[in-house]
Amino acid sequence: MVGPVMNEPDFNETYNKAKEIKQFEDTKSGVKGLVDSGVTKIPKFFVHPKESLPSPTPNAVTPLELPSIDFSGAESAGERRREVVEEIRKAASTWGFFRMVNHGVPISAMDAMLEATRRFHEQATEDKKGLYSGDGRLKVRFTSNAPTRESEVGCWRDILTCVFQDDCLDPQVLPSVCRKEAQEYVKCMIKLRETMAELISEALGLNNDYLSSIECMKSEALACLYYPFCPEPNLTMGNAKHSDTTFLTVLLQDHNIGGLQILHQNQWVDVPPIHGTLIANVGDLMQIISNDKFKSVEHRVLAQPIGPRLSVACFFHPSTKAISKPFGPIKELLSEKNPPLYRDFLVHEYVAYYKLNYGLIASALPHYRL
Ligand code: OGA
Ligand code: NI
């Protein structure tokens, strides 16, 4: 092997990260556009440091399996509902994640939503680039996951975000290729949220209308995600390790390609897709109001050697009214033995703090911890 050549220019010195990112962003065609252009090497701003990439030799431990909860029979009071509430309590306080079976969302609406996500991302760039924007205030926007600051690294995915603030979004601003499906899917998510809010309230030992009364899950942000095939999947991530800032997230995965992993007992556990099921996870804000009873757990998505992989994440956020009211550990859960672990805060301040530090902090929880 040839040793390093003296006087060869140091790539790090000549590499202009900001310029390369701008060139990429200016195409407005996302990561899919890069792949379509035939790249065989990924741009350097997508390359993650070795320590944050999955180890090439996976642990040889017995694979763990995410708890799976069957929701049939949980609609009405009775023995089965009590069991489901107990299963939610256990899963939310240990794994922070669970699989939902018989959740009431029609499989046809789920499949249609995934197909609509594919249709959006597989349009010609010309037809979708009008929505390409870094402006986080827009209710509907198309972005990739390129870094927005020096210290960050990009992730190998494209995102269509649709925000239904207070359960509403003007249908005219939704892309026509997925309008009907997104509206229908959000309707199903709202119905599911009503059930989940009751069951989670009960799992916290509260009246079943508690979470609904504080309006903490009354807005939905749909992230319609497209993880294209990656020519160098061992150098980047589909989505780097993170926890969700939400109260609750409900994730729909396509049924062909896996890649989602969650951190459990210091081990990355695969969450393979199973057709017809949904994955629910506790977000940071739920961890805070539950005073750490429920855990917001780190997860990630591997870059895909085959693809594309599709998923749709529904993030539940507070209503407009609730965003400017103080949140903190639920008073009914506190006692002398169980003192508050977090200070009270306004959700919009929390979100602003997280955005300001995006890419620099794993979560905003420590900032609010007493
Ligand atoms: C997310 C996320 C997982 C997935 O967008 O926050 O964790 O499978 N997505 O796409
Ligand atoms: Ni997430």
Image (spheres, rainbow, N blue to C red):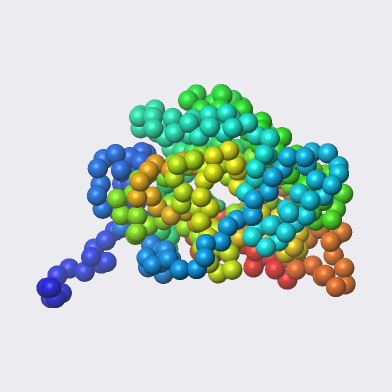
Q: Is residue 298 above or below residue 78?
A: below
Q: Nearer the viewer, residue 166 or 181?
A: 181
Q: Quadrant of residue 171?
A: top right
- 54 vs 86: above or below: below
Who's the residue at 73% across and 53% down the image?
Answer: 88
Seen from the viewer's position, the closer of residues 96 and 316 is 96
> Compared to 111, does 53 lie above or below?
below
Q: Residue at x 58, y 45 (%)?
A: 251
State the residue lying farthest toward the front.
Answer: 62
Direction from residue 318 to residue 19 in the image, left or right: left
Quadrant assignment for the N terminus: bottom left
Task: From the top left corner, tell me how far across and down residue 365 is, in percent.
Answer: 65, 64
Looking at the image, can residue 18 be seen?
A: no
Mark count: 0
Does residue 111 appear in the picture of this structure?
yes
| Image side of residue 334 versus residue 370, left or right | right
Q: Is residue 123 left or right of residue 37?
A: right
Asked whether 272 or 28 is in front, the reply is 272
Q: Position of residue 217 (x, y in %)?
A: 71, 44
Q: Quadrant of the C terminus?
A: bottom right
Give the image location of residue 307, x and y in percent.
37, 43
Give the residue displayed 59% in from the left and 32% down from the top.
107
